[in-house]
Image (cartoon, rainbow, N blue to C red):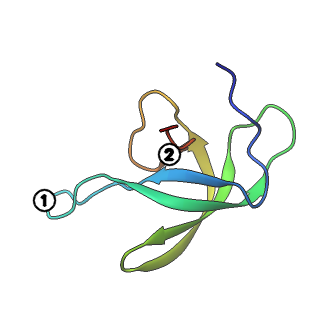
């Protein structure tokens, strides 16, 4: 299945890193696309919404399958 193009204003999921000691686990967080590269690049800028506040992250890599910390993916369809 083909995924849509990430464009400014779209909602995606950002995967948090978690903490080394395990106090916080890696989790999906809601994020809004703030900038999107033209062409084949899967790097985008995000405004990530966390329970503790919001942060901005530029040049976030897409990871639809592995979903490792520090990457984004499209929300699952339910």
Q: Residue lying furthest top in this view?
A: 1
Q: Measure the alpha-carbon separation of dots 1 and 2.
A: 20 Å
**Residue that label 1 marks:** 21
Indicate left or right for 1 with 39 as reference.
left
Label annotation for residue 71: 2
Q: Secondary structure at mark 1?
A: loop
Tell me if mark 2 has few (under 14), some (14-19) or many (20+) residues whose alpha carbon lies within 10 angstroms of its own. Answer: many
Label annotation for residue 42: none
How far from the left and from the top, in percent, is residue 54?
A: 50, 77
Q: What residue is rendered at 74% in x and 35% in y? A: 4
Q: What residue is rendered at 34% in x and 54% in y? A: 17
Indicate left or right for 2 with 13 as reference.
right
Q: Secondary structure at mark 2?
A: strand
**Quarter placement of the N terminus:** top right
How far from the left and from the top, in percent, is residue 49?
A: 49, 70
Q: Which of 20 and 1 lies nearest the eye of the viewer? A: 1
How far from the left and from the top, in percent, is residue 40?
A: 80, 31
Q: What residue is rendered at 49% in x and 53% in y? A: 14
Q: What residue is rendered at 53% in x and 44% in y? A: 75
Q: Which of 20 and 76 lies nearest the eye of the viewer? A: 76
């Amino acid at each position: 299945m083909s995924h849509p193009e990430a464009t400014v204003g779209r909602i995606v999921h950002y995967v948090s890193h978690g903490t080394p000691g395990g106090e916080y686990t890696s989790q999906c967080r809601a994020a809004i696309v703030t900038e999107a590269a033209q062409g084949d690049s899967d790097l985008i800028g995000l405004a990530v919404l966390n329970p503790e506040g919001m942060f901005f992250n530029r040049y976030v890599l897409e990871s639809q399958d592995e979903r490792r910390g520090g990457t984004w993916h499209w929300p699952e369809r339910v």
